[in-house]
Image (cartoon, rainbow, N blue to C red):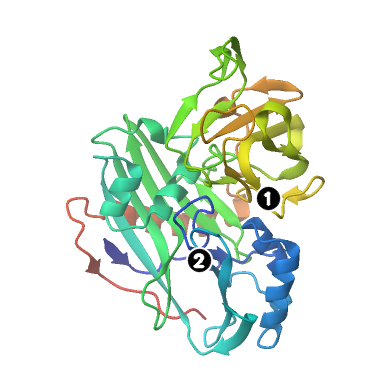
Amino acid sequence: MVFLPALPSAGRTSGTTQHPSSPKAEHVHVHVERGDTFVGVLGKYGVDVAEAHVWAEAAAAAFNLRHMRPGRGLSLRFEAVSRRLVEIRYEIDGRSLLLVERTAAGPVGRREALPYVTEIRGVGGEIRQGLWQDVMKAGAPSEVAAQLVDILGWDIDFSRLQPGDEFRVLYENMWIVGAKEGVAGKVVGAYVVSRGTEVTAVLFEDDDGRGGYYRPDGQAVGRTFLRYPLEFSRISSTFTHRRFHPVLRRYRPHLGIDFAAPRGTAVRATADGRVTTAGWLSGLGRTVRIDHRDGLRSTYGHLNGIASSVKRGRSVKRGQVIGYVGSTGLATGPHLHYAMQRKGAYVNPLSLRGMSATPVSADRRRDFMRVRDTVTVQLARLDLSTTTPVVESMRGPSE
């Protein structure tokens, strides 16, 4: 693992979001963007509106969370099993921190003089066992691997990585002075080569914390949709017009993808949209359906439970937790049935194309090139032959 110098930014290149679908993750670090609200951010991670208001009221004695600023860090800590929110930390400024903790009497907030420190860490290596195992062996948390899948999932088939394939990644590690460990932030640069295909992604954000991942030529990486709605162990059934149904014992179309995953694994909306179904739906059991733009509709079936913030008629954001893997309805074991329709006709959700995000605008290109040059140089100098940490430099407390 290498600790690298701070990267240049058009605004502030800062960290965010551990992958919300990681069943082992207890911490989430969100980089506040313009238009974000405290209640809205908590809703994205399955906290209902009423509980979010309780936490906001507890914080108000020290800081009014309605005044969150773009570019600031908001950290959430959940109990791993119950997913109950137990702590909130918000970066008020470079000298003070809002801390709200759950107590027996309810959440209690206070202000502390503990600044954040942001490190840029770099790891790389060859694929020997699998992406998650090899990223962790190189010294990064599994959430970094989860982000890689989201960022490059449309360009690299991570389920087909083979020994000898290579990865390099730069990511932010958010520390609070005095804490025992940091929280993984956003990936700021990534390079993966698989079966001869090379893909480089560079994070580029504006002053409001908005942006995305781009190739070195400024074209957007990925699509407006996430390719995968969860972290899964394998694809147990593919999209086909003729499959032998394990429960009904007869052949019938299977117009979706089945992802095998442990019961309780979080399921995410793959794009922004409006919920049209949030309840029991015949053989699909507990199901969420979401209408998206351009006549697209996604379906998430056999859920063990639906997130309390997800109701019919409500809007959801890409990456928002909408439910949890189960085996309700006609299912032989825990898995997610994920289907996609375009103007009423079912299509293979893993084959969707033509949804590329917007490239870097002409007026931001010079700033992007400055960030790109630094990121690609630092990616190239990562040593793949060792996992021994080497400290080169560290970014100081946030302003």
Q: Looking at the figure, which quarter contains the N terminus?
A: bottom left
Residue 174 spot, x, y in % from top left: 44, 70
Q: Residue at x 56, y 64 (%)?
A: 30
Q: Amino acid at mark 2?
A: Ser
Is 317 situated above or below 130? Answer: below
Q: Which residue is mark 1?
A: 317
Q: Which mark is residue 14?
A: 2
> Would you say residue 291 is visible in this rendering?
no
Q: Residue at x 33, y 57 (%)?
A: 140
Report the label total. 2
Quadrant location of residue 287?
Answer: top right
Q: Amino acid at mark 1?
A: Lys
Q: Which mark is residue 286?
A: none
Whether residue 10 sits left or right of residue 53 in the image: it is left
Of 2 and 8, which appears nearest the observer? 2
- Element marked by disc 2: loop
Residue 267 spot, x, y in % from top left: 58, 44
- Which of disc 2 and disc 1 is earlier in sequence? 2
Whether residue 276 sits left or right of residue 347 in the image: it is right
Q: Residues within 10 Å of mark 2 (few under 14, many from 20)?
A: many
Q: Residue at x 47, y 39 (%)?
A: 261
Q: Marks 1 and 2, how far apart in space?
A: 21 Å
Q: Are marks 1 and 2 in contact (CB under 8 Å)?
A: no
Of 43 and 357, which appears nearest the observer? 43
Q: Residue at x 52, y 81 (%)?
A: 399
Residue 310 spot, x, y in % from top left: 72, 50
> Would you say residue 63 is visible in this rendering?
yes
Whether residue 104 sits left or right of residue 114 in the image: it is right
